[in-house]
Image: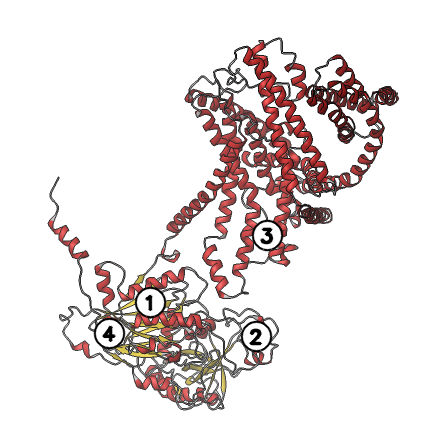
Amino acid sequence: MPPANNNNMSEISEEFMEITLERVNASYYDMPMQRNELLLKEKTYRQQYANLYFLRLTILGPIVLEAAQKKWDTTEMDQQGVENVQIKTRHTKKVLETKPGVVCYILGTLYVSMPYKPNILDEVTKEHWAEELPPREKYCSENDEYMLEDESGRIKLIGDILKTENLVTGIVLAVLGFENKAGEFEVMDICYAGIPPQKKSNQMETDDNDEQDTDKYVALVSGLNIGSDDGQNSMERELFIDYITGMVGSTQEQITSSKIVHVILAGNNVVETKLTEDDSKYKKHGHEGTDYDMGTVAEFDNILETLCSTVSVDVMPGSHDPANATLPQQPIHFNLFPKASRYSSFSSVTNPYWCQIDDVMFLGNSGQTIDDIYKNLHGDNRLEFAEKTLYWRHIAPTAPDTLWCYPFISHDPFILTQTPHIYYFGNQKEFATSTVDGPDGQYTRIILIPSFAETGVVVPVLQLSDSPRSAAAVVSTPLLMTSTDLSEEQERFYNAVREIIIMLLLFLPLYSVSYNVIQRFRRKQRQNQAQQEVEDEEEDVFGIDELIMGFLCAAGLAMALAGFFLLPGTMAATALIELQSSEKGDDNNKQHYYYYLGWLDTNLLVTLWNYTFIGCNISLFGLLPFAYFYNETDQLRNFFAKARESLTLMLLVGLLIYGFIYVSKAILKMNELPSLVVLNLLTCLMGGAICLTATPKGYVKIFSWIYSLPLRPNYRKSLKDKLVENKMETRAWEHKLESLERELHSNNIDLSYTFMPSVTSSLPLSSKKLYVNGIRRNKKTSPTESLLKIRDEIQAKLKKLELERKQTQLDLSHSPLYRNISFFLLFVLSHIILFLLISYVAFNFMKGILVFDEKANNQQPNLLSVFGKKTSSFLSMFGAIGTLTEIALIFYFTFATIIGVYSMPLFAQMKPQWGRMTMQKTIGNVALLLVISSSLPAIVRILGLLRFESAGPYENFHLLKNGNWVNTGFRLGVLITSVLAFLDYYILGSLRSFSGGRDWNYLNNNYNGHLAFRHYHNYHQHPHYHIHDLTTHNNGFMQQQDQNYNYNHNNELDDRLVIGSVANDGYRNEYTNGYENEYTNGYTNNVEDGNETNGKNGYANGYDLKNSHHNNMNGYIDDHRR
């Protein structure tokens, strides 16, 4: 192993070695003269703002005149085609003393007349309860007019130079030009006061070689917005505090943090307090103070306490802070900061704010001045606007025109008397900086400080060195990487990674649930594979094939579930985002919403739609066909051979499907569309056909289940009778099992040996099979196998009876009140949902008929436009309740479709059964669900249950020729089938029940007589004809009679209704109450006592009456045949 590098080791040890750091000190000067001008010792508002303009002109007028004389008195002007223009320029003292055609220069205060500028009179006289219009971003326009005024009057200025020069109201300037015949002054040139002088630093005379260990920094931060609803801000603020205090970073970064000598917080330190509509009703007078959240102020106090313990902090007020709204803003009161005010390093200062740190002069404000200038000027170069204020020698020239300020009468604190070295503006959209060099050696660094809450994470730090010129070197320190710090490619990469991670987190639970469901429905492997018969589907010894096909089917089922939950999830997401973006509600709730829903945005939902579409199609046309062909291949071959054969078959079938799509494109005249789009369109048409047929059946099934909930008054007696019947039948089967086991034991057969019957056998697991094939023993099998089959089927019957007994006992424990209340609620809810569903479909059907413009019928907003905007859905006006109602409609339609599909004869054989499904049935069920889920977004949108269009390539019906009529026809079909299903259940069902009960009452009595005769005859012919033989024979005979009667009844009496199920209930109950109870009381009890003759006599008491019924039954059936 090579020896380690000693130099590298020493560098590492120096980096991580423990050192003691001390905060670097710097001199601080608060510039009392400028501070006193900004402090308001006496506040009176009786004076006019005209005094402020006059004071500004008085102070800056001589300075502007001097600059104009230096610029123009030595200049000779050319005529340039202007008639009667004298070449020599001169100064005109008053603006109204100009003469037409005479070149001169005048000075005064500029006024810009802007039509879009807000009017103070409108603000005073407007109705306070009326909704305000959104504020304009810009007040300027092409119709603005410029005027120059002084104490004598006002003159209108014209000229192209006025459009190119950025001019605002309140500037004191001089203009060179002449008056035209219309009395307007044509401007040829403009002169400003110029950059004020700058104080020289004492350190400029020091030697440049003495710069060792003199680096010092001042941190400028604005827009902390403590208490905002951005959950990420808390972490960013903690990181900012740790960075300033030197608690994070490497040793070198901690050394840099120790050189921060001052921190200036440039306004908007707490979140803006917005009054709600209810709060505004009680604010009737201006002297009523604004309610600030003291919790946010207390949190701000805690932050200041931490900072002030290590470094000096100056706090400037902003537009959001608890201070006066007019400029200059006064310092925030010390009583609001009980903890931070105990430190001498804490200072609450004015806005604007002057200070001097180590001979470097700072001037800054919280951004109101530059924001107001931005509204009055064309363009968006804020650095240029800030530089103009230096040439104008005024910080806030638009005050008091469009920017509120105090009406000073003795001085104007916004006039620049000296040039600062650092000139900063807080709460800007982004970080920017530039330098300005004056004609007399002035040097100024202009800095735009971004809002910490919005762009956050970036703290501009100023490096202080020996001279003001080097002091203007700016270091932008990002505390946390944000999207603004990333390039476009990096941002796309991180967004893709985020979306993939979220998709994976959503897919894994769905896949886990799907796999567990498939395993529960999947047929279990048999225990004794060596002794079982070879059937259609053979089990592999190691279970690898089963595992592979199970994984593939689980993936398909997971994507089907994702398709079913896609629409309700998207609607819930849109509602949550609308709730989050709403201005109503307190800030705490907003903060919680953002904290939990900050990851949810438009791009994520659109990606979710695309991934779901792709996954459903891959599963339907890739995974499931592979699983099916893999299951059908030779079971004795290895995995790779089976996979190769499956892929070959998939390729051949894929070519066949491609040919079908090619022909379909030619038939439908869609040759210009891609094949995948046509395939999706055909899938949607297939799903639409299934929904059109199955959904009404689902409605009927749901209604039937709801009507089975209420309990009748005598339900407990019926259940108790059922328990007695179950107990008797269980005893009979146990007696039969004991006899059979004795017979097996006498033949020396191992009782632990099991012989499970084939699941795919054509003979059902019923008493009929036991009586016909069990007792008589199948001739194709040996006697031992026959006995074992009978024994296993009897055990299965006993398990079934045990389950029925438990279910009956569970029904007995149910509360009638609970069941009846549930029935009432579900009855009302289901009918309301069905009524709304039919109403939606009817409305969209009428819209499709009356509005013939296809584009007008598809004017639903796109998914991308839903977020942050209110939708036009009818139920959307009800807010969260409307959204929940729409989600309930979609779920109801989906459940009805799935339930109705398995009620159709075509898919009834595929109905899932616990532990009984083969792999072929599993694949078929998953494919069926995928077809429904793939077509559901298009179907739901056509029916009008969505408030927006489907995202992604889900819906392509508009690509069909006459696709609007296809949609209209589908709506009409759904409307008709839904209404007919409703009427069929309530009206035709009642008639069917009434007719069925009337026809079968008479047949019931005669049929019971026939059964009694048969049982009496068997009893006399076979003395050992016990109750289990009677039950077995009775079940087989009754099933045969049911089939014969239904067949004859349907073929010969078409005008009659099929009422076999009602008849079954009728004669079974009659048989149970009439004969079986009599036989039980008369025969079974006596057999237990040893008196079998009494049992026979008790049974034969009703023979004479029953014998006559046999003849009556034959006559009744003959009448029906005729």
Q: Earlier in the sequence, mark 3 or mark 4?
A: 4
Mark number, residue 467: none
Label 1 secondary element: strand
Position above or below: 1048 against 679: above
- Determine crowd level at label 1: few under 14, some 14-19, many 20+ residues with C-alpha closer than 10 A: some
Q: Nearer the viewer, residue 304 or 1095?
A: 1095
Disc 4 residue type (three-letter): Pro
**Quadrant including the C terminus:** top right
Residue holding disc 3: 861
In three-dimensional space, the C-alpha distance between marks 1 and 2, rounded to whole angstroms, equals 41 Å
Disc 2 residue type (three-letter): Ser
Image coords of residue 296 (percent x, y): 43, 70
Disc 1 residue type (three-letter): Thr
Label 2 secondary element: helix
**Quadrant including the N terminus:** top left
Position above or below: 1022 against 282: above
In three-dimensional space, the C-alpha distance between marks 1 and 3, rounded to whole angstroms, equals 42 Å
Q: Earlier in the sequence, mark 1 or mark 2?
A: 2
The reply to whether discs 1 and 4 touch (Cβ–Cβ < 8 Å) is: no
Q: Earlier in the sequence, mark 2 or mark 3?
A: 2
Left-right relation of 745 to 360: right
- Of the residues tagged 1 and 2, which is closer to the observer? 2
Mark number, residue 280: 2
Mark number, residue 433: 1
Label 3 secondary element: loop
Residue holding disc 4: 468
- Of the residues tagged 1 and 3, which is closer to the observer? 3
Q: Is residue 601 among the parts visible in the rendering?
A: yes
The reply to whether discs 1 and 3 touch (Cβ–Cβ < 8 Å) is: no
> Which residue is located at x 63 percent, y 11 percent?
777
